[in-house]
Image (cartoon, coloured by chain):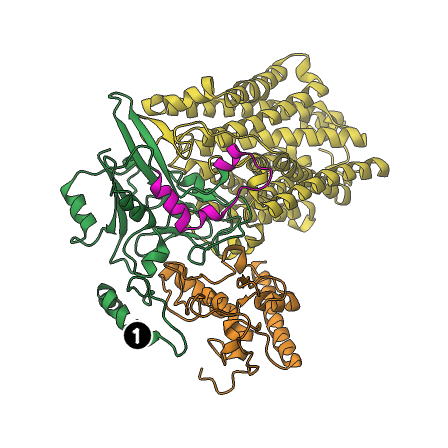
Amino acid sequence: MAKAVVLGSLLSVGLAGALVALAAQAAGGSYVVPGSQAATLDSCVEQTDFMRRNHMEVIKHQRDETVHNGIRSTKHSLAGCVECHASGDPAGGVVPVDRKGQFCQACHAFAAVGMNCFDCHATVPSQGEQGQGSPSRSPLAASPRGAGVAFTGQRSGEGYPQ
Amino acid sequence: MKRIVYREWQLAPQRYWGLLAILAAVAGLGGLAFAYMEHEGHWVTGMTNHVVWGTPHIFAVFLIVAASGALNVASIASVFGKTLYKPLARLSGLLAVALLMGGLLVLVLDLGRPERLIVAMTHYNFRSIFAWNIFLYTGFMVIVIGYLWTMAERKGNVYTKQVGFVAFVWRLLLTTGTGSIFGFLVARQAYDTAVLAPLFIAMSFAFGLAIFMLVVMFAYTQDGRPLGNALLLRLRNLLAVFVGGVLLILLAYLLTKLYGARHYDLVSFYLLSGGSYTLAFWLGWILIGSLAPLGIFAHPVLGQDRTWLAAAAGMVIVGGFAAMYVLIIGGQAFPMPLFPGQTVVESGFLDGQVAPYAPSIPEVLLGLGGVAVALLITAVGVRVLQFLPESLDDRVVDPHLAAAAEPA
Amino acid sequence: MTEARDTIDRNRRAFLGAAAGLAVAPGVLLHTVAGAAPRSAPVTSDVRWGLLIDTAKCADGCTACVTACDEENGLNLQVKPEGQSEAKWAQQRSVWIRKAKLQDNQTGRITNLPLMCQHCERPPCVDVCPTGASFKRADGIVMVDRHTCIGCRYCMMACPYKARSFIHEKVTAQLTRAPRGKGCVESCNLCVHRRDNGQESTACVDACAREGHQAILFGDLKDPASHISQMLTAIASRQIREDLALNTGVRYSNI
């Protein structure tokens, strides 16, 4: 029975992945939220297409490495996702990534895939928290986001080294 | 001996659907309670960081233990070859599976992350008696369902004895495992003893048989089928032995704890100063759950009276819940022996104090929902399949009477 | 491979310093904390983290370590659910470290001490966990993998120190360094994020030192040269519930 369930969930994950990829193609490109750090970069930590399909595997692998082996140096941490994909609001604050219409939530809602990460994980960047678990990018104070950050538009990750 | 004819339960439709509706409503309330607890989190229950297992676990452990005991009649029939019990062996197997399902459902729905049940089925830590129990429970269901098949299908009849034997051994392992969930806990004074395993086995015999007797009596009276005294009185005697067995092992448990000075306080908590736990122990477990039924069983008149027998079986069940309350909740409420020879004057975490616990309505509803599911499975089972012998008249079931009745 | 890993670990600081330089990707600034870098090699059993608590220095009425722990791990961000009574909330909110004040039944001597997960070498909570979510890291830290914890609470039944808490309600505010949410069990993890980022001590140790008590000492129990090892050699110390022979990583002196 367990096997069937595992198979079923694998299948649904695969389908969801395909759906996401299709949706992205149909819409012709980017879904990063304007005003997020991601909007200023050419690509995600891996090629964008790869990330669209496999980000859950990447995060899951990293999660086991971090929890059991204490490895926090890699670029694949969930904290990194949040750091980069959270956008600013006009008031100068940060919009949580699981808020409606934000990067994580919008796509997961579209693909109708549950998102359990944020039951436990913080939805806003660490704001320079001490001892924060990822090689954090520049603290927010140093690079205020939101208005004024250009939306580059080129997201397909062409030519980005794997 | 006459051939036993099995027939579906033929309760009048209105009555039958009415019964199902009531059970479904209780089960539904349990479902709502689960949804509420799952949505809000466990703060809406009486459970805390001090009493981490609460009312759902009373129900779950009771049902799981009773499930094993419900198989008594089938075991006696096929393993020990007592033909008197054979007609009811099928019902015994059905009830065992149903009670186990009800109990497991409560246990699973009380998890902090019930949606991660798949994790529990794909990640195992085999040092954990809990992980072992997952196999013991699922294995029990598979074996008993196979056992039912060998009894119901004529081609399978030849295997009944062997499969019955496997089921018998398995149920003993299952209850040993359930008792060991507590017995292996070195941390708490109330647990940490191997005697909990046999205590749970004895409790399973008693509680399971008590439920079985009630179900048989109810099914046969509602249906107007003949139910003779020969079988009923044998079950009564058996139940008396089991209740006595529980008392004996309970005595061994208390004496084990009482022998070393370091457990004096625990025994005095249970027997004298434990408030609701002491009350549940003496009034619930000992008086209502053990001595009163034993008195009824032994009484020359009352011991023959169906109503009194049913009441006594019900009292054993009440006593069973009291026993679970005392062992599970009381065992946790009693403070841990962190600092022997010292008194905790102040603590930020109730160290050295009896932890308070008050059951909440959702917890109780969830537990009752499990009972309802177990009975629902049973009610549907006996209605659609041939579980119940058409007659349990003395002349049908008792080989001696049957032989006497048939003119040679 | 193991040998190489061991060497790496022994010279971890030096190695990480160099690796950090290499790891800085273009356009990404490395946010450094006190000159330390995030860990890039798996933890090994060459170290075993532990605490030594001098109860003689633990001040009556001081709860600096408790407050610091709450702030470090975001436990103070969890709010009492609406409609919950204060008494019940006190029994349901997460407590990773608590203060206890003891009085000897014979002599009347008073002892104050903080109590948290004792990071046993053979932890009962790890033995009983059905899914393996409760585990001991190679470096001796006993913790919960919240990704596989199903919330059965059997570990809480098994812990001889009542060191674990269950999250009874939805948590909406978390710190990045300490993810936590409803339905899982949690406990002191010796500030594992600090370990992985190469920081010196734990929040409780720092707070205690800040108060001027210095009752808690943190360090590597396997390194004979560490301060904690030397103190443990020099003075008498005890484990709580020594009878269980769990070989705890948290030791107490003057108890």
Q: Considering only vertical position in the picture, is B44 above or below A117?
A: above
- Residue B346, given in percent of the width and then of the height, sits at 37, 29
Is B265 on the left-hand or right-hand side of B286? left
Tell me, yes or no, if residue B225 can be seen here.
Answer: no
Residue that carries the numbered disc 1 in the rendered image? C21
Colour assigned to chain A in the rendering is: orange
Dominant secondary structure of the residues highlighted in magenta in the image: helix
For residue B94: magenta?
no
- Residue B332, given in percent of the width and then of the height, sits at 46, 32
Mark 1 chain: C
Colour assigned to chain B in the rendering is: yellow
Residue at 40% across / 44% down in the picture? C96
Q: Quadrant of residue B116?
A: bottom right
- Residue C20, given in percent of the width and then of the height, sits at 31, 71
For residue C65: magenta?
yes
The region drawn magenta spans: C63-91
**Which image quadrant: the N terminus of chain B?**
top right
How many C-alpha atoms fall within 10 Å of the one at disc 1: few (<14), some, or many (≥20)? Answer: few
Residue at 39% across / 48% down in the picture? C126
From this viewpoint, which residue is outermost toward the left?
A: C234
Under circle 1, the secondary element is: helix
Residue at 24% across / 21% down in the picture? C107
Q: Quadrant of residue C17?
A: bottom left
Q: Which chain is green?
A: C
Give, as a three-letter code, the residue at label 1. Answer: Gly
